[in-house]
Image (spheres, coloured by chain):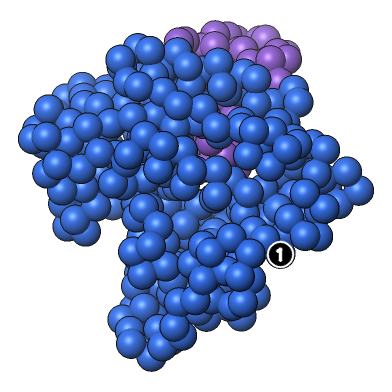
Amino acid sequence: MRWCQQWLTGIQIPKPDIYAISPPSTSTIVKIILPDKSCRTTGSGPLTVEALLRDLGIDPIAVIVARNGTLVTEDSVVENEDEVRIIRIAHGG
Amino acid sequence: MVHENSPVKTPSCSLCNEPAVYHDKKTGRHFCRDHFIADVEGRVADTIRSRNLIVPGDHVAIALSGGKDSTALLMILARLLPSWDTVRLTAVTIDEGIAGYREDTIHSADQMAAKYRLCHTCVSFLELFGGTLDAFLKGCEPEACSVCGILRRKALNVGAERVGATRLATGHNLDDEAQSVFMNVLRGDLPRLVRDSGSDSKGMFIPRIKPLMFISEKEIAVYLMLHGAWADLPECPYAVHALRREVRGMLATLESKHPGTMLHLMESKAKIEAHCSGVLDTEPVRHCRECNDPCSGETCQLCQLKGRLGI
């Protein structure tokens, strides 16, 4: 895994043709607005809305999610400086 | 992480190429804005038609709390109404007297009724029972939902009678109905499990209808969001005490892992109802010795409660 260690330290070397796991993109930062209006960011790379919610410990059935101001499905992908707003569904009414 | 064979950034509608805004995990179908709205409204129309919930000439009182479910109910019925001849809508709002909660939703109800140009009647616990729910619940907060449910049922009947309604429509959704089925099973309450709120009391009350009974809470939230009618309103402060809260959490987890669970519960209820038809329905309807309202015992639940609360 020498190439990997060198890649992580920023040294440019030829990469193998096939990767078991895609290398993380350092430009991927997702801004998250949580139901309580607090903000946080995640730099874990492209991922589905559902995976993001699971990472945050939020049940997808209890919220709706807007990406950059547009409602999206749980199997949509967030990446590259997307802004994700998570809206809790209040019960009753 | 997203790897090979990963999902596209925005899935497309299963019926057209527009970006999807809703994914039905049970069927696997994606819906764009327009197809989602058409699907929800179509299913509500089907529910109404197949169960004869509304017939020509009906005057439907919508129990409009101002929360998301009743707001969606009003919007959908108002949009479907032009296709039904001679059906009239009126909004009825109950002010239970819950400080810090009801003010916002009543304001929202006022705005919705005005927007759709509906007559709007408000009935308060203070007017009907001489006090607010907050006052009645001092020291017995864990009973909040059962106390409120009994008082609210009476208040809605009074409101519907005042406006001359022939149907009382409530915003109960699929989640609510599935939770009720589950709760009645947990309580071992078979009569309540199979009781149809639209036909109980043998027609002595204005029939209640639930046009959103097959629309999930999440679908309602998405519907409102797509219409720009989503309001971030608070939850009832007494909800924390309810058994329903625990059941809701359990069912939500099951629905996430096994899409369709809530619908299956409703189907189970329908099958049990069919098997019990004519078996559990033998108890004669009596009249309460205190208020003369129809009931199953000597005294109705409301009068028993009023006696207990000293009101």
Q: Could you say which is closer to the camera, residue B167 or residue A21?
A: B167
What residue lies at 57% left-to-right and 23% top-to-bottom? B105
The crowding category of the residue bearing disc 1, from other C-alpha atoms within 10 Å (few below 14, some 14 to 19, many at least 20), is: few
What residue lies at 12% left-to-right and 44% top-to-bottom? B56
What residue lies at 57% left-to-right and 69% top-to-bottom? B288
- Picture quadrant where residue B51 is located: bottom left
- Asked whether, in this view, residue B103 is left or right of residue B74, the answer is right
Q: Is residue B50 above or below residue A63?
A: below
Residue at mark 1: B304
What residue lies at 24% left-to-right and 52% top-to-bottom? B53
Check disc 1 and give the amino acid type: Gln
Question: SS for tag 1?
Answer: helix
> According to the rendering, which colour does chain B have?
blue
Q: Is residue B267 visible?
A: yes
- Picture quadrant where residue B88 is located: top left
> According to the rendering, which colour does chain A have?
purple
The image quadrant where one finds the N terminus of chain B is top right
Residue B211, given in percent of the width and then of the height, sits at 31, 47
Residue A82, given in percent of the width and then of the height, sits at 51, 12
Q: Is residue B94 above or below residue A37?
A: below
Q: Is residue B264 visible?
A: no
- Asked whether, in this view, residue B8 is left or right of residue A55, the answer is left
- Chain containing mark 1: B
